[in-house]
Amino acid sequence: MSTVRSVITGIGVLAPNGLGTEEYWKALLAGENGIAELTRFDTSGHPAHLAGEIRDFDAAEHLPSRLLPQTDISTRYAVVAADWALADAGIDADSGVADYDMGVVTSTSQGGFDFTHREFRKLWHQGPEYVSVYESFAWFYAVNTGQISIRNGMRGPSAALVGEQAGGLDAIGHARRTVRRGTRMVLSGGVDSAFDPWGWSAQSAGGRVSTADDPGRAYLPFDSAARGHVPGEGGAVLIVEDAVSARERGAERTYGEIAGYAATFDPAPGSGRPPGLRRAAELALADAGLAPSDIGVVFADAAGIRSLDAAEAEALRGIFGPYGVPVTAPKTLTGRMYAGGGPADVVAALLALRDQVVPATAHTTSVPEEYGLDLVRGEPRSVRAGAALVLARGRHGFNSAVVLTPA
């Protein structure tokens, strides 16, 4: 087992209910709902109308004008979140960290919709031979990583991961692996946005998006009235460092340690084997060297689909016992941010450990007794938590789990 400790020294968050780490945290604790009618285009011809939309972000205030035509909104969010995370960690040209000692590992799952749709429209008039949607998407998945690394002179090991909602946690897990292999610092996390007509249609076609029109009743994970999720945009970028290196360069703060990580894949449908979420959580706990009793709070995946909620509840009961640990899903205030959702939950978990308070799961009111969940509802709850477990699942079988502890 590696003796290298991977700690988080900087955070950048852009979420529908808060821009910036502390603003996001205050919004979660206050129950400020970022879900409302989508305004980026006319949704009248679509079955779903609500979204967790970031409304107060002006890319021109944060980025050079030359960068705007080259990027879509997802990459702009990612680049700005990276800038904020680096500033928070106090990393700049004078930090003493060489360019080859800094890497970038990020995740996005659908951020290419807006950009690819725009380029598709322009190129189509030049002839079909100029258009390759698949190549455009494949290229775009690496854009966030590339733009961040070029902008900040980071030439160390880098990667772009795709695992839908689980991808953001996978990026953080891979960043930890990269640090353990000798890279001093890795900028990691995930950001997503697909609020253009093409992207919105693709999300709705998946059959999991809520068509409710009441922002307070549209996304109800673990509720008997669960009817799907509300899409969100944004996410979080974090600075993952070797703890010794961070101390040597004089890092001002350490939010916590990535103590454990694991990923699994669900078996084929009809195999009779259970989903892989429980195993991912158990492997992450084992990786951290912790027992279930050491976990003070779980940040759930919270799909908002009855069958998926029931499966997650079963996994948690199997690990912790009925009502064995406080469970929360603050993403009910932002919508599911796909690759950005897991990293945003990691931020919330780190701040929950810092302040010893767990944000509530908004809107959910009627949890089936058979779930056996101690779901934090109504108001934030004070806790005595020494570790947190963050879970995420992606479509088609991805499962990821991260265990966090105070540094």
Image: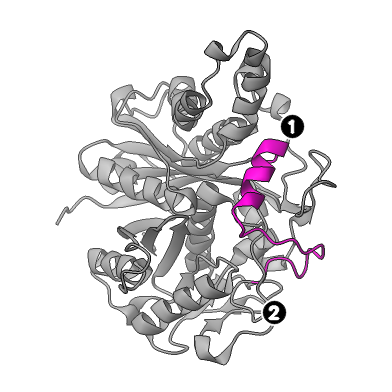
Q: Is residue 107 visible?
A: yes
Residue at 34% over, 23% down: 155
Name the amino acid, label 2: Gly
> Which quadrant of the structure image shows residue 333?
bottom right
Residue 58 marker: 1
Q: Is 197 one of the magenta-colored residues?
A: yes
How far across and how far down the image is residue 56, in percent? Answer: 77, 41
Measured Cα–Cα span from mark 1 to mark 2: 33 Å
Per the picture, the main secondary structure of the magenta-coloured stretch is loop
Mark 1 element type = loop
How far across and how far down the image is residue 346, in percent? Answer: 48, 57
Q: In this view, does 374 lie to the left or right of 294?
A: right
Vertical placement of residue 126 versus 311, above or below: above
Q: Is residue 14 visible?
A: no
Residue at 57% over, 31% down: 75
Q: Give the range drawn in magenta.
A: 195-220
